[in-house]
Amino acid sequence: MTITNSTKEDLSEIFRLYGLATEYQRIKFPDNLWPEFDEHLITTEISENRQFKLLIENKIACVWAISYSDPQIWEGSENDDAIYIHRIATNPDFRGNNFVRKIVEWSIAFAKERKKDFIRMDTCGNNVRLINHYISCGFTFLGMKKLKNTLGLPSHYHNADVCFFEIKLDY
């Protein structure tokens, strides 16, 4: 297992995994589905080294992105020094390998190297099973609320109940 930055050559696979994740959401939690993401968003993340992939035997098993600020979603906490995890999508051939836990382990080391205080993540909808999964992977569930300003955010945030999770890093 290797974690590395995604490249532009990975774009078609990233979008394939996003599409498969949306189909999985349609079955498991149809009230809140990922929209089609803008290619420019993903290519920007790639060029800024903020899009990652987990490889198993040279096959992309999982992808995700990070950001270093998220002021619209994390209103009131936007000045905290954190990394924010977004859009974890798992290749169905590799489901059941608890990649969120592996991403958390990687994120802790990644964030500490950069002297960050928090690892944060959000998800839309009151998906109790997913909330409990994130808690079991080390996140503290901070609660749920609707966002005040969703202008410019992907459509799945509009009028959604957003769940907030964080890990406080100890040094």
Image (cartoon, rainbow, N blue to C red):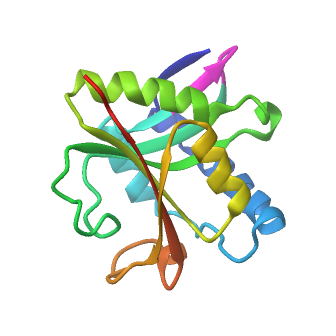
Q: Is residue 35 above or below residue 148?
A: above
Q: Is residue 61 above or below residue 164?
A: above
Residue 147 point in image, percent of width and height: 39, 78
Query: As drawn, is 129 to the left or to the right of 93?
Result: left
Query: As drawn, is 86 to the left or to the right of 171?
Result: right
At 15% across and 55% down in the image, what residue appears? 79
Region rendered in magenta: 53-59
Quarter assignment of residue 169: top left
User: Magenta stretch containing residue 136, yes or no?
Assistant: no
Query: As drawn, is 123 to the left or to the right of 74?
Result: right
Residue 41 point in image, percent of width and height: 39, 57
At 25% across and 64% down in the image, what residue appears? 71
At 64% across and 70% down in the image, what residue appears? 126
> In this view of the protein, can residue 82 be seen by the observer?
yes
- Quadrant of the snapshot with the N terminus: top right
Q: Considering depth in this image, is 51 or 74 the residue closer to the camera? A: 74
Q: Main secondary structure of the magenta part?
A: strand
